[in-house]
C-alpha cells in the first residue's frame, strides 16, 4: 500500500445494528480493532475490484439471462 497521508473524509453511512456488530466482531478478532482501519481496507478492496472489472459498482446491475 502506498503511504499517503490520510487527509480526506468519506461520507458517513448508515447501516443496520447487525452489520455494525458483525464488523465489530471481525475487528475484535484482528490485529487492529480500529473500525476505521477495517472500513478503509474494505473500501480499498471494493474500488480495486471495480477498477479491475471484477465487481459492479453499487447501484449497477449485472446482465442476467432470461429464465
Image: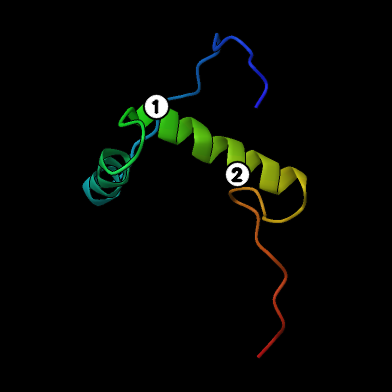
Q: CA distance from mark 1 to mark 2?
A: 15 Å
State the residue at coordinates (36%, 35%).
Answer: 31
Q: Measured from the top left, where is residue 14 in percent x and y? A: 34, 37
State the residue in front, 7 or 11.
7
- Residue at which label 2 appears: 46
- Picture coordinates of residue 10 (x, y %)? 50, 23
Question: The N terminus lies in which quarter of the figure?
Answer: top right
Query: With 1 as the anchor, is 20 left or right in this view?
Result: left
As drawn, the residue found furthest toward the bottom would be 67
Camera-nearest residue between 24 and 10: 24
In the rendered image, residue 3, in percent from the top left (x then y), is placed at 63, 16
Packing grade of label 2 (10 A; few <14, some 14-19, many >=20) is some
**Residue at the front extreme?**
31
From this view, report whether residue 61 is shown above or below residue 24. below
x 24%, y 51%: residue: 18
Q: Is residue 21 above or below residue 56?
A: above
Q: Earlier in the sequence, mark 1 or mark 2?
A: 1
Task: Determine whether the residue tagged by mark 1 lies in a helix, strand or loop.
Answer: helix
**Tag of residue 36:** 1
**Image quarter for residue 37?**
top left
Mark 1 crowd level (few <14, some 14–19, many ≥20, 10 Å Cα): few
Name the image quarter holding the C terminus. bottom right
Q: Secondary structure at mark 2?
A: helix
Amino acid at each position: 500500500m502506498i503511504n499517503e497521508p490520510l487527509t480526506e473524509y468519506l461520507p458517513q453511512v448508515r447501516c443496520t445494528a447487525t452489520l455494525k456488530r458483525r464488523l465489530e466482531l471481525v475487528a475484535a478478532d484482528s490485529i487492529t480493532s480500529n473500525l476505521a482501519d477495517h472500513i478503509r481496507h474494505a473500501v480499498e478492496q471494493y474500488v480495486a475490484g471495480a477498477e479491475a472489472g471484477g465487481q459492479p459498482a453499487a447501484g449497477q446491475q449485472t446482465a442476467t439471462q432470461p429464465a
